[in-house]
Image (cartoon, rainbow, N blue to C red):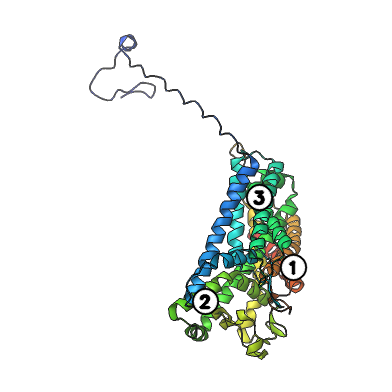
Amino acid sequence: MTSPDEDVLIGTGVRPSDEDLATRPTVKIPWRQRPAPRPPRPAAPLLVAAFVNTLWATLICLVAVALLVVLGRVSLGQRPTGVEALVALGGWLLAHGVPMKSGPIEISLAPLTITILAVWRLNRAGVHTSRGIGARDNGSLKAALSVAAAVGVIYGLLGLGAALIVDRPAISVVWWRAGLHLAVIGALAALLGSIRTTGALRVIARRTPVLLRDALRAGFVAPLFLLGAGAGVAGLSVAVHGQEVARVLQATPNGLAGQAGITVVCLAFAPNFAAWTAAYLLGPGFLLRAGSLVSPALVTAGQVPPERRAPLDQLPAMAGLPGGPMQGPLWLLLGLPALAGLGAGLLLVRRRLRPRRSRSGDILMPVPRWGRMLASAALAGPIGGLLMAAASYAASGQLDDGEPPLGPVLWRAGLFAMIALGTGALLGVAGAYIFRQRKE
């Protein structure tokens, strides 16, 4: 046996002495040097990078709109004639909230699916432009704002050019309004990407009080939950009224092609329907026409004569509209907005109580500050109400000659959302506090 301090030789040989080991030949391994770092790429000029990325984002959106227009023409039994490019430009402007007039009729209802696609691509334009000018992770707010301003100006000029092309005697488009709408949307969407890519968002977050930071997060998440609930309830209602939907689809001309076209139109306005249903769940409901209200307590849409209904009323998705006030257990659906706020409040608590790792690698358990979290939850209500009002504004518009726009009433949706989401967030934080006290 050997002692723990002795070396153990595995095998049958005898351990050589230290002198013998010193005289044995050794193998010299060549030193592998690290390759020299590549020189950094030269930064591209801001205007060049912004122009290329903004133009690419615009082309993607225009191609998507053009495909929808061509599909719509085919579904109506018509052959493409080249006018689809002009219609696609008009639809692209309409998706940015630019109203159009054809005689006494004003069209301003934006298909929000195209709007979301445009915002996403502009966001990526802000990301790629920030990288192209060499501003990645430099923490410069000035660079992020410069990128957003450059993308916004170029996007506004593209919108202005499109408005001048679309403006005809039969269709009227205000060119300065088109440039302004697209410049504002382009700058804000690009700022979301540039401020994150440059790292300026982290710098701003560190300088923002924790109370306000938590309120902004909860106030942003709660309306998203509410819009998701609206989309789910709208889809469930359409599924329940499946027979009526099938009847509308069967009445569509040109058979399968016509059904595909009208389905694509429904998908283009799907976010609009989600926002309308969210306003319905909040209580105030939404308008379909002058004197036509859809709310949990009152439904007057069926009292409007067919010749007075908006064109959007004829879509299969509209078959899911309620035929009357809520009855029985359906009233429980009105608790979904409060549940959306409740979920946002619980996520706020979870984030603040989550263990964190220090720079030295130690696990730190944060001390809960319930008063601050309750204040953040209370402030999340007004923030969520403002965002819901903005979503209602984006989802509303006109399809007629100057009558009230389709969609939720702006101030009502914002006020009810502020109350419901703020109350739910407070209940979430308070419930987490009670549960933690009982657990301890």
Which residue is at a point 64% across and 67% down the rendered structure image?
94
Check disc 1 and report its element: helix, strand or loop. Answer: helix
Check disc 2 and report its element: helix, strand or loop. Answer: helix
- Marks 2 and 3 close (CB-CB < 8 Å): no
Looking at numbered disc 3 in the image, what kind of residue is underneath it?
Val
- Tell me where residue 96 appears, x and y as whole percent: 65, 63
Looking at numbered disc 2 in the image, what kind of residue is underneath it?
Ile
Alpha-carbon distance for marks 2 and 1?
35 Å
Check disc 3 and report its element: helix, strand or loop. Answer: helix
Q: Is residue 173 left or right of residue 68?
A: right
For disc 3, the marked residue is 151
Q: How packed is label 3: few (under 14 Cα within 10 Å), some, or many (20 or more)? A: many
Q: Is residue 147 left or right of residue 6?
A: right
For disc 1, the marked residue is 418
The picture quadrant where one finds residue 86 is: bottom right
Q: Earlier in the sequence, mark 3 or mark 1?
A: 3
For disc 2, the marked residue is 262
- Tell me where residue 160 appears, x and y as whole percent: 68, 58
Q: Earlier in the sequence, mark 2 or mark 3?
A: 3
Q: Earlier in the sequence, mark 2 or mark 1?
A: 2
Looking at numbered disc 1 in the image, what kind of residue is underneath it?
Met
Q: Would residue 440 be visible to someone looking at this image?
A: no
Which residue is at a point 57% across and 54% down the rendered structure image?
57
- Marks 3 and 1 close (CB-CB < 8 Å): no
Q: Nearer the viewer, residue 217 or 272?
A: 272
Which residue is at a point 69% across and 82% down the rendered structure image?
289
